[in-house]
Amino acid sequence: MHYLITGHTGFKGPWLTLLLLGRGHRVSGLALDPDEDGLFKRAGLADQLVADFRVDIRDSEATKAAVEAAAPDVVVHMAAQSLVRESYRDPRYTYETNAMGTLNVLDAVAATPSVRAHVVITTDKVYRNVNQEAGYVETDPLGGDDPYSASKAMADLLTQSWVRSFPGIPTAIARGGNVIGGGDVSRDRLLPDLVAAYANGRAPLLRFPSAVRPWQHVLDCLNGYLTLADALLANSGLGQWNFGPGRDSFVEVGQVATLAAELWGGGAHWDRQPGDHPHEANLLALDAGKAQRELGWRNRLGFRDAVAWTIDWERRVHAGADPLAVTQQQISAFEDL
C-alpha cells in the first residue's frame, strides 16, 4: 500500500513514516522544509520515501499537482500550523493553513483517482471547551476560543461538509490529544521545553502548571490513524473519531514536568512562569470509547510509560545514540505490546 503523508517533515510525520515502513508500506510526503534539528533530517528519512514534495498547502495548484503525481492509495492529512501560541502571533497564517489548506488537500484528493481512503487529522481542541471533567465525545459541539482551536474546528467542519456534499473517496476525521514522544523540537510544547531545559541544567518555566491535558504517546495516536485508514479501506470507518488516552493519562502539566525531571535525573526541576499569558484551556480531554468499541483500537502505553519512553529517547540521543535507530527500536517494542 502506498501512503501519502502531508506534514511528514514535522514531529508526527517521521514517526508515522517509520511506522508505515516497518509494516511494509511505501510512503511519500508533502510538506514544508523540515527543521534542521528535527527528526526528519536527523534520521535521514528523505532517502526512504517514494517521493518527497516541498509544497505549502495554501497553494492549491501545487498541492493538487503533488497529490496527483504521488498517486497514493491512502492520504493522511496532518499538515498544519499546530501551535496555540503561534496562532496568536500569526492568526492569518494559521487560518489559511489549517482551514483553506485542508480545503486544498480535499480538492486534490478528489482529483486523484488512485486514492482509496483519506484520513484528515484535526485535534481535541476542536471541541467547544466547557471545562467538563468527562471526556468529549464525537457528537459534542465544536468551538474554539483561540485562533488555533478555531482554525482546526473550521477544518473539521469543512471536511464534514465536503464529505456530505461531494461523496466519493472514503474520508474520516481523526481527533487526537496532547501527543508526546522523542524528537519533537516544536516551540511552546511542554516536553520539548522540558528536555531542552533539563539537558542544559536549567529549570523550565511553566505557564499553566495546573492545566490538565490527556497525554498520549505518539505511537498510540498514529496507530489510531492507521487503524482508521484500515477501516476505510474495508468500507467502514466513516465519520469522526477520537483517539485519546485513558483517564489515568489526564494529568496536570506540573505533574508531567515533575515525572520528566525524576526520569531525567541530575536534580532537574521546574518553576512557575510569572505574568499574564494568552488564553489556553485549563481542562481538555477526549473520550475514545467509540474507537475502542467499533475499531478495536486501544492505547498500548499508559501515562508513565508514555513519558518514560519520551525521556528515554531524548536521553539516549542526547548521549550520542543514532535517532533513527532509537526510533526504530521504540517502534519495534511498541509493535510487540
Image: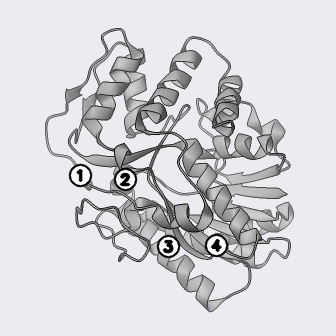
Q: Which mark is residue 156?
A: 3
Whichever of callouts 2 and 3 sits on the residue coming sooner in the sequence is 2
Q: Nearer the viewer, mark 1 or mark 3?
A: 3
Q: Nearer the viewer, mark 3 or mark 4?
A: 4
Label 4 neighbour load within 10 Å: few <14, some 14-19, many 20+ = many
> Horizontal and vertical percent for residue 118?
69, 69
Residue 188 in the figure: left or right of residue 102: left
List the residue tagged with mark 4: 237
- Residue 164 position within the rendered picture, expressed as x and y whole percent measured from the top left: 60, 88
Q: Position of residue 320 (x, y in %)?
A: 61, 12
- Which numbered tag is attached to residue 150? none
- Measure the C-alpha gap from mark 1 to mark 4: 37 Å
Report the residue marked by disc 1: 278
Frontmost of labels 1 and 4 is: 4
**Which residue is under mark 2?**
84
The quadrant in which the C terminus is found is: top right
- Residue at x-position 61% and y-position 72%: 172
Q: Is residue 33 visible?
A: no
Q: Earlier in the sequence, mark 1 or mark 3?
A: 3
